[in-house]
Image (cartoon, rainbow, N blue to C red):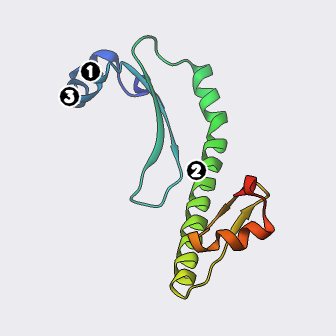
Amino acid sequence: MKFSDFMTRRELHRLDIYEHFFHELGVEYQIAVGLPAPRPIVIGLALSRTKRDYTERDRTVLQLMRPHLVQAYRNAQLYTALHDSFEAVTAALASEGRSMLLVHAGDRIEGLRPGDTNLVGRYFPPATR
């Protein structure tokens, strides 16, 4: 949705939020798309500019991008959950003097404690650590 879907520029300029926020940022035109989120959270992406309103082509491009933005957000949520779980497991293992390593396809190793370096060095060359 665009500002201009709801009001004229004159009506926008009469709003307190325009005077105290949008005007200070130089925002005259804005288009936004919402992403799914559990209530009461609202997630959206807003694009703003000073000159020239957004076109219907701009709206179409943003609508075409929306499924990809949703997937990117879900990927970020999943990564965060997996990372938090990994951190909890490695902390629990560390409290018992044990370790768990996560090896990323030869790219890097996570969960490496200082005392684990010698053991890992036997199995992985230094370039992967």
Is 13 situated above or below 116? Answer: above
- Tell me what residue is drawn at x 79 percent, y 57 percent: 106
Tally the numbered discs: 3
Secondary structure category for the residue under label 1: helix
Q: Which residue is mark 2?
A: 73
On the image, the x and y values in percent for residue 83 come to 58, 65
Mark 2: amino acid: Tyr
Image: 32 above or below 42: above
Q: Secondary structure at mark 2?
A: helix
Rendered image: mark on residue 119: none
Q: Which residue sits furthest bottom?
A: 96
Q: Between disc 2 and disc 1, whose residue precedes?
A: 1
Judge the density around disc 3: few (<14), some (14-19), many (≥20) Cα neighbours within 10 Å.
few
Q: Which is nearer the eye, 74 or 100?
A: 100
Is the C-beta separation of discs 2 and 3 under 8 Å? no
* Closer to viewer: mark 2 or mark 3: 2
Q: Position of residue 55 (x, y in %)?
A: 55, 17
Mark seen at residue 23: 1
Q: Are marks 1 and 3 in contact (CB under 8 Å)?
A: yes
Choose the circle earlier in sequence order: 2 or 3: 3
Q: Percent position (x, y) of residue 50?
A: 39, 15
Q: Quadrant of residue 23?
A: top left
Circle on res. 20: 3
Query: Gap in Å between the C-alphas at discs 1 and 3?
Result: 7 Å
Q: Position of residue 61 (x, y in %)?
A: 64, 27
Q: Is residue 114 above or below residue 22?
A: below
Q: In percent of the image, x 25 and y 22: which residue is there?
A: 24
- Front-most of 116 and 61? 116
